[in-house]
Image (cartoon, grey):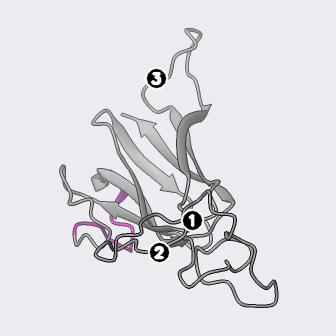
Amino acid sequence: LFQSTDPSSTNFLRLSSASPCVDTGCPADPVPPDGGLIVDMGAIEYLYSPSLSITKSVTNVTLGGSSNTAIPGATITYSIYCTNSGLGRGLNIVLYDAIATNMTFYTSTTLSGWTNQWATNKTPDQSYDSPDYLDTMPDVTNVRWVRWKNPVLSYYTAGVLYFKVTIK
């Protein structure tokens, strides 16, 4: 029923995921953040975890010549799919990608709740509040990294972030 029955534990009398008391309280009572769909029966709410998955793919390439390969001047569109399939919220989520040295950053898009940022140095600090990332896009020829951050990614949400580069 409980994660721990040891009074010295930080999880003392916190419900375990297998407890029959999870999501069985009064449906009219408000549910705390990350508490599931219905309030629990018990003093300490079981906190759900996020279940994040990230997938990056190439969704469009403008090709040149007849060799079916991208050539200088061609544009590549990358899609980054972000999904939280868990009942818990994802907090301070950061997604980032380096721009290859043989490419020039072209543009990027964002979603509601996300902040799009750019860095011009080779090895920026990747922490959530990094001073190396800019909220205003610099000259695109200087962009070395693109990233998105989200302070609270809700449960059962999904979205796609895009960015484009041009081959030098």
Asked where in the image residue 42 lies, by quadrant, the reply is bottom right
Mark 2 and mark 1: span between their CA atoms?
Answer: 16 Å
Q: Residues within 10 Å of mark 1 (few under 14, many from 20)?
A: some
Asked if residue 165 is among those painted magenta in the image, a careful observer would answer no
Q: Position of residue 78 (x, y in %)?
A: 54, 41
Which mark is drawn over residue 71?
3
Residue drawn 67% across and 83% down? 31
Q: Which residues are magenta?
A: 132-140
Q: Is residue 85 left or right of residue 105?
A: right
Which three-letter amino acid code belongs to the residue tagged 1? Tyr
Circles 3 and 2: CB atoms closer than 8 Å: no
Give the farthest residue toward the bottom: 29
Which three-letter amino acid code belongs to the residue tagged 3? Ile
**Quarter of the image where the C terminus is located:** top left
Asked if residue 138 is among those painted magenta in the image, a careful observer would answer yes
Q: Secondary structure at mark 3?
A: loop
Give the farthest residue toward the right: 28
Front tag of 3 and 2 = 2
Q: Residues within 10 Å of mark 3 (few under 14, many from 20)?
A: some
Which is nearer the N-term, disc 2 or disc 1? 2
Residue drawn 69% across and 60% down? 156
Which mark is drawn over residue 59?
none
Q: Secondary structure at mark 1?
A: loop
Q: Work out whether 162 lies above or below 156.
A: above
Q: Position of residue 29 (x, y in %)?
A: 74, 91
Residue drawn 74% across and 81% down? 25
Q: Secondary structure at mark 2?
A: loop
Residue under numbered circle 2: 13
Residue drawn 37% across and 43% down? 104
Residue under numbered circle 1: 48
